[in-house]
Image: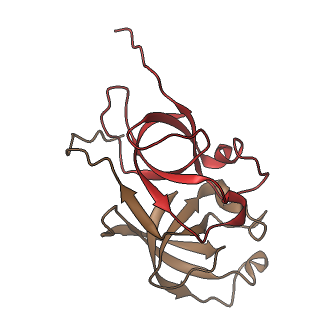
Chain colours: A brown, B red
Amino acid sequence: MVLGKVIGTVWSTRKDENLVGAKFLIVRHIDLEYKPKEATVIAVDSVGAGVGEIVIVAQGSSARQTTFTKNKPVDAVIMAIVDKLDISVKEKQKETVVV
Amino acid sequence: MQLGKIIGTIWATRKYEAVTGYKMQFVQPINSEGKKIGDPIIALDTVGAGPGEIIYFVTASEAVIPLDVDMAPVDASIVGIVDSINIES
């Protein structure tokens, strides 16, 4: 899962009929210091999140593993609202390997 | 599966019901030499690992298999704590 901040809502009338009733939120990826990254994702809300909240987004086929999104064309779902982060292992900036 | 190091814990009161009772940990993926690979991810802890420990985790829909529930929106789960790694050069 990845950390993100809800920055907006998406409304759409024409959509796959399986998606009727879903609440779509735009989530901007953020880092451990809550700094925004470039990427945004549209995620279906499963916990009642709102704009401005820090959330956790599950992506890929796992996003279909909720009662609402089962067998629906969804690849990102908000599965938790973050209360607090506790980063206890602060490492020196080691060389990052790109894969 | 991939190696990772736990760098922190996340508290979330509001979460999808099926994952209630599981801890969520921040995991920095690493290679066999302990170097960071990419950005940290959030993984559900199924083995009782703690910050600072080297673990391995599964990603994608397989991450639901170690949980007690049939369905949960989880795309990364910690499935083991590493005692030692032996690499023959």
Residue B29, quarter of picture: top left
Query: Is A88 on the left-hand or right-hand side of A68?
Result: left
Vertical arrangement, residue B17 with respect to residue A96, above or below = below
Which image quarter holds the N terminus of chain B?
Answer: top right
Q: Residue at x 63, y 74 (%)?
A: A44
Nearest the viewer among A59 and B58 is B58
Judge left or right: residue A88 versus residue B59: left
**Where is the C terminus of chain B found, in terms of image quarters?**
top left
The quarter holding residue A75 reads bottom right
Residue that appears at 67% across and 58% down: B19
How many marks the image carries: the answer is 0
In the image, A63 versus B6, the foreground residue is B6
**Picture layout, residue B55 above or below residue A56:** above
Q: Where is residue A5 shown, x and y percent of the image?
A: 44, 74
Image: A39 above or below A50: above
> Where in the figure is residue B8, as x and y percent of width and height?
40, 51
Q: Is residue B42 left or right of residue B36?
A: right
In-front residue for pair A51/A60: A51
What residue is shown at x 30% (from left), y 69% (from top)? A35
Choose top left, top right, bottom left or bottom right for residue A58.
bottom right
In the current view of this chain or complex, which residue is farthest to the top? B88
Where residue B49 sits: x, y (%)?
A: 51, 40
